[in-house]
Image (cartoon, grey):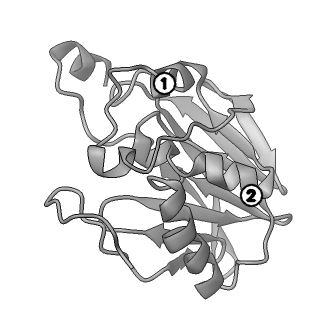
Amino acid sequence: IIYLPSVPIVDMETFEPCQLFDNLFFIGTKFIGTLVVKTGEGLVLIDSLNTRRDVEEILRPGLEKLGLGQEKILAVIVTHGHFDHFGGAAAIQEQSGCQVVMSKRDEEFMREPDNIVLEMFAKDGVEYPQVTIHVEEGSTLDFGGTQFHFSYTPGHTPGGISLVFPVYDHGEAHMISIWGGINPPASREGCKTY
């Protein structure tokens, strides 16, 4: 059930949860999604949708459909400090006790008064996760035997991060790169940084 009003750029129509690689899955909407990495010890989520409601109505059912509902969530990696990336992280952290990974700069940006949260999402209340691990350029983290390599990629937000990690296609290893904020900023200075 979708409770949100129809807004052309914020299309909340859900996609069928899907498997992209042996260990990588997608759950989300036409507007935003969560990548789910299955490791040897549990799941790592890359971004967390918009709100607690999205976690309950989109993410949890998606995990069940993919057969991942009983897996432990080890971490949520928040690529940048916009609400549609951090909005569900507090609920996931509360329910699972997982780590929340983010750059220190975007943890600050996430809480800044001029960081806009669309009214359609703010009406449910904005929840901020407790960031437990800060990453920066060159950081590497291991979750469940899977290594995640981080780069600092500001521009879309002041402290955006991108990452590289292994995926498998019928057992054959590949490395995949996830850019943490694809839309260029509106300001000239921001575009130079981007």
Quarter of the figure that contains the C terminus: top left
Mark seen at residue 111:
1
- Count the labels in the image: 2
Tell me the element at label 2.
helix
Residue placed under numbered mark 2 in the picture:
95
Find residue 128 and report its horizontal and vertical position in percent. Answer: 57, 36
Q: Is residue 72 left or right of residue 26?
A: right
Gap in angstroms between the C-alphas marked 2 and 1: 22 Å
Q: Mark 1 belongs to which amino acid?
A: Arg
- Residue 157 drawn above or below residue 64: above
Residue 41 lies, in percent from the top left, at 86, 64
- 177 or 33, which is in the foreground? 33
**Residue drawn at x 61%, y 35% as measured from the top left:** 150
Residue at far top of view: 189
In the picture, the quarter occupied by the N terminus is: bottom left
Name the image quarter holding residue 24: bottom right
Q: Position of residue 190 (x, y in %)?
A: 26, 19
